[in-house]
Image: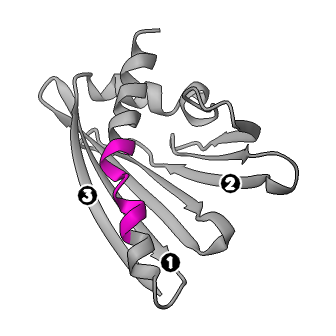
Amino acid sequence: MATKATTVVREIPLPIERVREITVSEEFLLRLDGDDASMRLRDGHREVHEDGSMDATVTAVVGEGDKELEMVQRMEVSEVREDGSFSIFTSVPLPKDIGTMATNQVYRPEGDGTLLESTVAVEVHIALVGAKIASQVLEGAPSSTEKGVERILRLAEQ
């Protein structure tokens, strides 16, 4: 078994309150983003708790027929903390159940904007090549974080 992690930091030129409003919306949590026509949303639901925290689950399907692959992503959004920060923890199993990818995104107020610190951890349950697979998955962390920031900015314009 191999576990690897990396952290990516990005600035978002929006106030933390606006970032929170966007990242807890159904549009952000329960919808697929992008032009990938091969991925379809099968199910999605969001539960809001009294303290403002929430849980969301999205099930997406890639492929057709015998090659269909279902992916279930679970998210936990924290309440807003005293310093204005909040976090989103996401967990998704890797294909063929070879492991798990978990992302912890911490959003903090930074001047007039927001600082995002995204830590991605990959755990692979394959002995000899697990570390290599984990490293390959982590190579996409900066790009994935950037796409998330772009999505927040795009939704802010709507």
Circle 3/circle 2 CB separation < 8 Å: no
Circle 2 crowding by C-alpha within 10 Å: few under 14, some 14–19, many from 20? some
User: Does the magenta-highlighted stretch encompass residue 109?
Assistant: no
Q: Where is mark 2, residue-wise?
A: 72
Residue placed most toward the observer, 135 or 58: 135
Which numbered disc covers residue 7? Answer: 3
**Element under disc 2:** strand
Q: Which residues are magenta?
A: 135-144
Circle 1/circle 3 CB separation < 8 Å: no
Mark 1 or mark 2: whose residue is earlier in sequence: 2
Please determine whether, in this image, residue 64 is positioned above or below residue 121.
above
Residue placed most toward the observer, 33 or 51: 33
**Element under disc 1:** strand
**Element under disc 3:** strand
From the image, state whether disc 1 or disc 2 is nearer to you.
1
For the rendered model, the colour scheme is one colour
User: Does the magenta-highlighted stretch encompass residue 140?
Assistant: yes
Seen at 45% across and 72% down, the residue is 133
Which numbered disc covers residue 43? Answer: none
Seen at 74% across and 54% down, the residue is 70
Identity of the residue furthest to the right in this view: 65
Give the percent coordinates (x, y) of residue 13: 22, 23
**Drawn side of residue 107 relative to residue 63, left or right:** left
Please determine whether, in this image, residue 127 is positioned above or below residue 143.
below
Circle 1 crowding by C-alpha within 10 Å: few under 14, some 14–19, many from 20? many
Mark 1 or mark 3: whose residue is earlier in sequence: 3
Give the percent coordinates (x, y) of residue 19: 36, 28
**Drawn side of residue 65 relative to residue 87, left or right:** right
Give the percent coordinates (x, y) of residue 12: 25, 29
